[in-house]
Amino acid sequence: MRRTLLALAFLATSLSAPAMPADPAWRWDNVPRVVVFGDVHGAYHELVPLLQQTGVIDASLHWSGGTTHLVSLGDLLDRGPDSRAVMDLLMRLEAEALRAGGRVHMVLGNHEVMNLTGDLRYVSAAEYAAFAEPSVAASVDPSVSPALPPGYAEHRQAFAATGRYGAWLLDKPLLIVINDTAYVHGGVPASIAALGLIDGNTRFKAELLEALASQPATPGEPPAQPTSQPVTPGDLLSDAGPLWYRGTARCHVLIEGDRLQRSLDRLAVRRVVIGHTPTPILRAQSRFAGDVVMLDTGMLAQVYHGRASALVIEGGGDRVVVAGDTSVNSILPETGAYAGEWATSDRIATLLENAPVSRSSKTVGGAKGELEVTLTTTDGPLAARFVPLSKQQLQHEVAAYRLDRLLRLGIVSPAVAREIDGKRGLLRAADSGWTSERARRDSGKPRVNECESGNDYLLMQAFDALIGNDARTTDNLGYERGTGELRLRGFTDAFRRGGLRGDAAVEWPRLPQGLRDRLVALDERTLVDAFGDQLEARDIEAVLERRNAIVNTWPILE
């Protein structure tokens, strides 16, 4: 009955009505101005100028934002020294904003929950020290707890359910909706699509209280090991839950796109704004054609080397504010091909094909005749690598890149045919930003799957099967160093004729629905237009034959 009444109240809300909650404290409509920031991590002295620059506080640090809604995406705490000062500021601004007709919202981040539940791995000594009180320190028996840092007991008391900060944080939700935008700390896994706004916040609170019930009965009493993990969390508090999930920030659009859309539909929003995962350029960026805005820009410079940033939403548009920067940025750049942004890779391909060569030299330890090349561009020199190839090998490499671009995969780096020093071969961007799977294994560095189901290897398997490439190795399978995104090489022996290879008794890889749709859309005319100058008609027929086998036999990734 209560949910029915809430739904009726929401439908009755007039578009001209003042800003008000449709779901109490969780959904707000008709808000004229929203200012959002993420992941402070105790960077008080970076946050304050940002809030002043966005007009929500004045020189005396009091609310000046009027009816603005200020949103924190969580992770106020840990790593930095001034988490307590950050919380004190926001707690005071909550009351001041309310009196002015505005609001201060905060969704919990994983670090707030960690502090509440006794996972103190990232609490800095300076942060503990900010809670230290001489009277408490004098009462601690060093023979009982000699290893506890100054301020530890007071910190635990403050974050207890009845403590000043614990009680404040326990009142905060997992996610909120303002106008057409949802706000959550980490991302939107399938649990959000399943639960929605009301049930998601309700279940989250129940899981959090259950986790708190496992804590010591006496506030300030240290656990057996202060840095140990608490009890096994519930689904929403787990590493796969919305506080920790990085698939929204990093998973390929073809794997994550449908799952994301289901969450947006369930929340009845156009997009979601997240923190938690620092953006590759430490500036606000978007993914999925603007459906996701990433706002963790590494505010704590001493650890993340970024700058405090905020997203200002008003007048039907967005504006990015960077502390100390007076320029106006109304465009949120997409993060890369994984999110469907192609301007950068297309520009690189154009430069590789047309920019003049200023210098070339033999590559030490490279293939015979391989050259390191420097191209002259308007943005400065561009480092590239040239590999002499036979005509057929070169055609296969170019066709592979063009097919990747046609399918909008982004797992094959830009590569073009070009003549350098009188030889014909393949020109691609330099290796400085690429590392092979062999090198990854030799280093012992794990590769974490950020996606909730499947990963980008599924795209590689489908692509190699489509082009008849049986030569995938740990040397031509690699990753972009900065982002960890998959990048493939080695297509000289691809585009063989014939159907799929493999034992039908062996389980086929799962095929992401988004990629299946793109494969189905391929036809002979499209392929001829894309790379008919590189492949013979029989080669293109073989691609279509393998395409038919893939879409008809491979199970769909749910």
Image (spheres, rainbow, N blue to C red):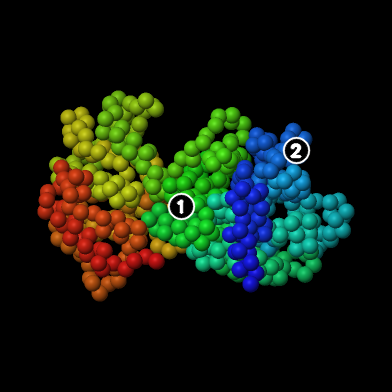
Which element is circle 2 on?
loop
In the rendered structure, are the residues bearing label 1 and label 2 in contact, judged by CB atoms less than 8 Å apart? Answer: no
The x, y position of residue 519, in whole percent, is 27, 57
Q: Residue at x 38, y 56 (%)?
A: 254
Amino acid at dot 2: Leu
Residue toward you, 327 or 305: 327
Q: Residue at x 66, y 48 (%)?
A: 18
Question: From the viewer's perspective, is residue 136 above or below residue 204?
Answer: above
Which element is circle 1 on?
helix
**Quadrant (top left, top right, bottom left, bottom right) of the N terminus:** bottom right
The image quarter containing residue 357 is: top left
- Residues under labels 1 and 2: Cα distance? 36 Å
Q: Residue at x 17, y 62 (%)?
A: 499
The x, y position of residue 365, in whole percent, is 29, 40
Residue tagged by mark 2? 61
Of tags 1 and 2, the one toward the viewer is 2
Residue tagged by mark 1? 250
**Quadrant (top left, top right, bottom left, bottom right) of the C terminus:** bottom left
The x, y position of residue 76, in whole percent, is 66, 49
The x, y position of residue 319, in whole percent, is 55, 38
The image quarter containing residue 207 is: bottom right
Residue 217's disc is none
Residue toward you, 250 or 532: 532
Question: From the viewer's perspective, is residue 182 above or below residue 333?
Answer: below
Q: Residue at x 62, y 43 (%)?
A: 32
Residue toward you, 208 or 123: 208
Residue 380 placement, left or right of 50? left
Residue 313 placement, left or right of 484? right
